[in-house]
Image (spheres, rainbow, N blue to C red):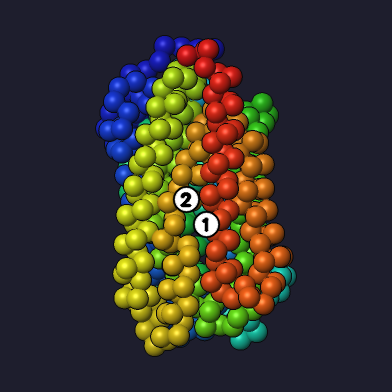
Amino acid sequence: MKTEKPVCLFRMGDSMDMSSGPLLGKMIVYAVPIALSGQLQLLFNAADLVVVGRYSGALSVAAIGSTNVMINLIVNFFIGFSVGAGIAAAQAIGAGDRERTAKIVHTAVPAALFFGLLLTGIGLLGNRWFLRLLGTPSDVVALAAVYMRLYFLGTAGTLLYNFGAAILRAAGDTLRPLVYLTIAGVLNLLLNLLFVLVFQMDVSGVALATAISQWLSAVLVLRALRRRQDACRLEPEKLSVDLRILRQILRVGMPAGIQSAMFSISNVIIQASVNSFGSLVTSGAAAAGSLEGFTWLPMNAIYQASMYFTGQNYGAGQFDRIKRIYRTALAAVAVTGLCLGAGMYLLGPKLLSLYLPDSPEAIAYGMMRLRFVCLPYMLAGIQDVMTGVIRGMGHSLEPMLISVFGICGIRMLWVATAFQLPRFHNVGALYFSYPLSWAITFVLQSICFALLFRRYRGRG
């Protein structure tokens, strides 16, 4: 049942009507809190590495860094489901369908809790097997296993936060997730200092602090949904799983999760190759990877803006505006990626020394990764935007298949062929697979969007 579409205000922390009015200004207002949320999260994650690097040593940094790829593989698969909840909510809001919006909210929350508890079990039972699969250096395996077990105690909170934040962002509220992430991050930092410096808990203290902060962010975002006065209001007595809504969420979210997992699988293969060069290369890669995130997250914020703006306009039937969204987002992400990628590379030596103060060789390996991955990061941003626009139109399978081939397939093929040649069996050649795969995927996603848009052109 469709009802009259509510008036949406153009301010952060409230709803935003994405289907009318100035486009660039709204996208900037929408994306800035998402970018700040991600940057704060990375700052707090970086603090984890800085604290253990300074007070526990390079082996502890390697232990955390060697688990990141596998943790991202498992967790991001389930977080991908939150994309389905957000797109479903954005389309329902754009269509002015309050009843359907409410059903999406009350299906998404119990689904997030179920997936989160399942994820916790996977992490607790399978951590040693995952580390063996990665070929983790023997001198860091014990520390890495402890870190993974404690980290996964907070993953149900992680999913509840991400599902709740996706619904808030679908309604145009990107400020509250930023505030809650900031509160949780400050707690994480304080607990890091307490557990590592005072209680001498090493990586176990960092993991426990992360788990506690993840649960705090979940409580805060659910509280925000509970206090809303629109169709996104969470009412505990109405929590139930509507199978039709769940299928819609999974139809978009499952391919997004598979795509994210496949990205991580290709990264697992690369991480295993990185690990084969020893703990110094692993430490340098872990520190550089943390820095790269500060470049990627502003681009990811533009990707999310393109996805949710497209979702609302798709629901409202405004297909001509979708083309404007895609062009605006591509220009914004290209400028952002070029500026931040170059800046991060230039500041790389000083920033890497914060993570690795007594290891110049590890810093050199970190700079090698920044050269091949961070400098051309714009390519990752533009292919993400294309994925976001296609996904916002309700098509999640197509970008998944393209990304599986263009990113995962190219990287795995590179490792299996060129990297095995003596001339290219080095760390720099390994990292070259990243920009190569981004460029190929962008071309394929652009062709896919052009074909889909041609189908919908007559509906605008």
Circles 2 and 1 in contact, beta carbons < 8 Å: yes
Q: Residues within 10 Å of mark 1 (few under 14, many from 20)?
A: many
Q: Secondary structure at mark 2?
A: helix
Instruction: State whether residue 204 is above or below residue 80.
Output: below
Residue, far front = 423
Hey, which quadrant is residue 393 in on the image? top right
Q: Residue at x 29, y 26 (%)?
A: 22
Which numbered circle lies on residue 121?
none
Q: Position of residue 225 (x, y in %)?
A: 43, 36
Name the residue type under label 2.
Leu
Counting from the top left corner in percent of width and height, residue 439 is at 53, 49
Position of 20 compared to 170: left or right?
left
Query: Residue at (67%, 48%) from the top-left corner?
Result: 405
> Position of 150 compared to 16: left or right?
right
The image position of residue 434, as x and y in percent, is 55, 59
| Residue located at (46% from left, 82% from top) | 362
Residue with the mark numbered 1 = 435
Q: Give SS at disc 1.
A: helix
On the image, the x and y values in percent for residue 149 come to 61, 69
